[in-house]
Amino acid sequence: MARRQRLRLQPRTPLGLLWADWINGYAVGHERLAKSLDYAEGGAVSDLRIDGSTVEAIVRGNSPQPYQVIWQFSPIDKQRWKLFWSAMSPEAIREYRKGAPGLATEAALAAADIHLLPERYKHLRPACTCPDWIRPCKHALAVLRILGLAVEEDPMLLLSLRDGIEREGETPPEPQAAGPPGEALDAGRFWKGSIDWEPWRAAMLTAGSPARLLKRLGPVSVYGIKMDPDAIFKPVYEGVASEARQVVESILRKDKKP
């Protein structure tokens, strides 16, 4: 009988590295994490199927019958996705499609209060037919590792899993090449035209939780002591936000003048 060739699940992109670190952050013990990697690299996972925000697969374990694994991603509301895409530049989209989410993508995610990778025990639920009482079990984690290969191959798959973006046609198309020479922008019309600030104001100044950028930082170390950045920088953050709000309100008042 021919020996099955083993996979090598080495991350090839920054997104792949994030995915691997995210899986290894599950508090299930080193032994289960190592066994899940062995299952994934040994070819125990098969029949991977993705339907919207649901991922299913079959895993061969110690039982004569293979185990069925299901992962269910919790959806994110459409309004937050729309805010995310409105903040994504064409360059940021291209970088993300290459598996290299940069600072622009991070800023867009923070503005929309979205985590690129779901919170492990809140926005992602596992199920497996094995008798192991710890969840996620090693079989479910092995499926996540194989899913990571598909995400590296097509990073847009991760966004689709978060809420079926591509399925609903909300993913913006690839940026088109610039038009022929001489097709210049009418600068006068641009600067003199009236701008509807209300949607922007509603999205940027009232949506989401306050100081959400600080909450994404997590604990920081100050002279070797871990401290909550929310407690350290919140007064400064709120002061800057207040000044920004006044500037925007001033622009709104001027824009509404006849």
Image: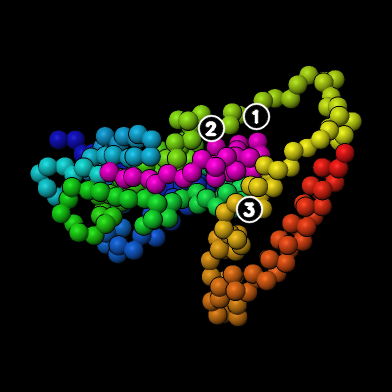
Q: Which residue is mark 2?
A: 170
3D distance between C-alphas at marks 1 and 2 = 15 Å
> Which residue shows up at 34% across the image and 63% down it?
27
- Identify the residue position indicated by label 3 in the image: 206
Q: Secondary structure at mark 2?
A: loop
The residue at the point 56 percent across, 80 percent down is: 224
Main SS category, magenta section: helix
Would you place residue 249 above or below residue 91 in this image? Answer: below
Question: Percent x, y for residue 146?
Answer: 34, 43
Residue lying farthest to the front in this orientation: 258
What residue type is disc 2 on? Glu
Front disc: 1 or 2 = 2
95 vs 251: above or below: above
Q: Which residue is under mark 1?
A: 175
Viewport quadrant of the N terminus: top left
Residue 175 visible, this orientation = yes
Could you classify mark 2 by the number of other residues whose Cα lies within 10 Å: few (under 14), some (14-19), or many (20 or more)? some
Name which quarter of the figure residue 134 lies in. bottom left
